[in-house]
Image (spheres, helix red, strand yellow):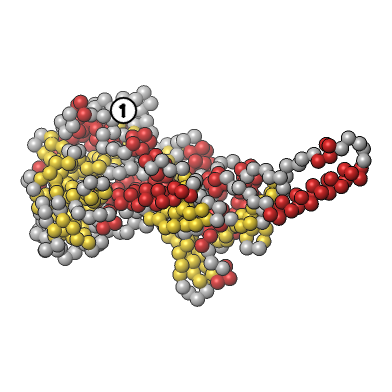
Amino acid sequence: MDSSKIRNFCIIAHIDHGKSTLADRMMEITGTVEKREMKAQLLDSMELEREKGITIKLTPVQMHYKGFELNLIDTPGHVDFSYEVSRSLQAVETAILVVDATQGIQAQTLANVYLALEQDLYIIPVINKIDLPAADVEKVKKEIINLLGCSEDEIIGVSAKTGMNVEKVLDAIVERAPEPKVASGKDLKALIFDSYFDDYRGVVLYVRIFEGRLTKNDAIRMMAAETNGIALEIGTLTPEMKPKQTLEEGEIGYIVTNLKTTREAKVGDTVTLAKAPAMTPLPGYKNVLPFVYAGFFPVSNEDYKTLKEALEKLALSDSALQFEPENSPILGFGLRIGFLGLLHMDIIRERLEREFNLDLVVTNPSTNYEIIMNDGSELEIKSAADLPDVSEVREIREPWVRGEIILPKTMIGAVLNLIVEKRGVQKNLSYIEDRAVIDFEAPMANLLTDFYDQLKSITSGYASFNYELADYRAEDLVRVDFLIAGHKNDALSVMCHRSEADAIGRDVTKKLKEIIPRQNFEVALQAAIGARIIARETIGAYRKDVTVKIHTGDRDRKAKLLEKQKRGKARMKRFGKIDIPSDAFTVMLKRN
């Protein structure tokens, strides 16, 4: 098709502002999907996406409207998938910014707007849910004008649920959105903005053609991964696959390849022809590295092989997923898995439990640390148990994140206190109408457990939070070990700042006291830094009344029986084994 008749766009918004619903109405109006096949969140194909009401995997779809070809990419809104969002923004020229009329601009709205402005995209502002009683359209219009500097006439008010004014959005795309730029080069350059593994067809790539032309059965090369493949089938998505013979400049489509894993064709890579490769790849490719790690152990050791096979299957589609074997004396064999963030971890855990019927114990999530040894060598560790002897360590660096919180003005004090509690530093405070934007920096490890829950709790759910990795900083960090009946348990060890160690030690030992069942002997729960004990709790022993069988008042006989019981308990304390329940390993995640 003539590139002047093509419009490539994506929809960006905060979670639950109506991206997927707006995409549904567009497909309905353009006749892309027949009414009898229509269902809510049509582009969210995973059961988890539909249940949680969020987009996890982006989806492209081609529509035809008034003689124009409209290529839409429905992007995820969550911070964990921001790299995917940035790649899909690079594949288009226009972004539709959707803002909820009842909630206004929120943290991920801002984050995605900044990403769109970085890519120099034309932004069409849309206010959704204008039909709701709680909608405050005038206030949200002012927020958008302040943010984008646009005029009031450019903002379109819609109700994606009822379809009201959605045609105006389509008209705005046709009339106002720029057409794809035609490059002068003839060598094929196509950006991979998503890839997934199909059990029957192999790796399928979603691409945007920037230069040249791709024909069916062409030999292709991924420039960053340095792998070769064959374009077995190419075409567009409506949203079903519709095969074509060629994909031209400016078009968005799919390539079915003969590759066996998405690691061979990662998001952001450039596809070119193997026979006539391009000299330079498209800009912006980076290798996405996980920075949240957790141990996954099957409840029964017999399921270890099933867990490993299940993860291998999930890793075929998710190139960011990394794992390695881990062995715990108590939990047995398991895997230490790296994730992009807490939502990513949550999704993988739920998929393993649902799709593969696995019963899992997940240890406390931690982040990675950079260790500088005395001899100058560098080492990266993913859990506290891997920390080398502290006498050989010069410094420990931990990851810090740059965060952004949007909240009502009246709640600033409580949130600033929470940031300080987490060793965070406030960097900037600005205002959008009646709401404040707090920019701050904080250690990643302190935000991993319940920061988001606490933020929602103290702001009654009104605050929204977005973050990105800033850098690694040297801090006074220590490893806190937990001893149960004198035995150190590596799976419970945590890294923390020295100033927080005492409080964490006391808190965790108290929680362990509630979780670990009482025994017939006394059990000591201790927190320690090296050989120094910093906290202790004691689980009292069950006491059987051994004197109940004596019917006389013979004191010597009673003393003899009690002394015998005391010796027995002392022996049990030396040899007794404690069965630690799986709840103990997620003790850091439990709220007080």
Where residue 293 sits, quadrant-wise, is bottom left
Q: In the rendered view, would you say 234 is above or below 40? A: below
Towards the viewer: 582 or 93: 582
The residue under the point 71% across, 55% down is 574
| Left or right: where 397 falls relative to 547 | left
Q: Percent from the top left, x then y, of residue 40?
A: 28, 30
The residue where tag 1 is placed is: 130
| Left or right: where 485 falls relative to 149 | right
The residue under the point 23% across, 51% down is 203
The residue under the point 35% across, 52% down is 312
Residue 401 seen from this side: no
The residue under the point 61% across, 43% down is 515
Q: Percent from the top left, x then y, of residue 352?
A: 40, 44
Toward the left, the furthest residue is: 2
Toward the bottom, the furthest residue is: 375
Q: In the rendered view, would you say 152 is above or below 114? A: above
Q: Percent from the top left, x then y, of residue 496?
A: 55, 56
The quadrant of the image that shows the C terminus is: top right
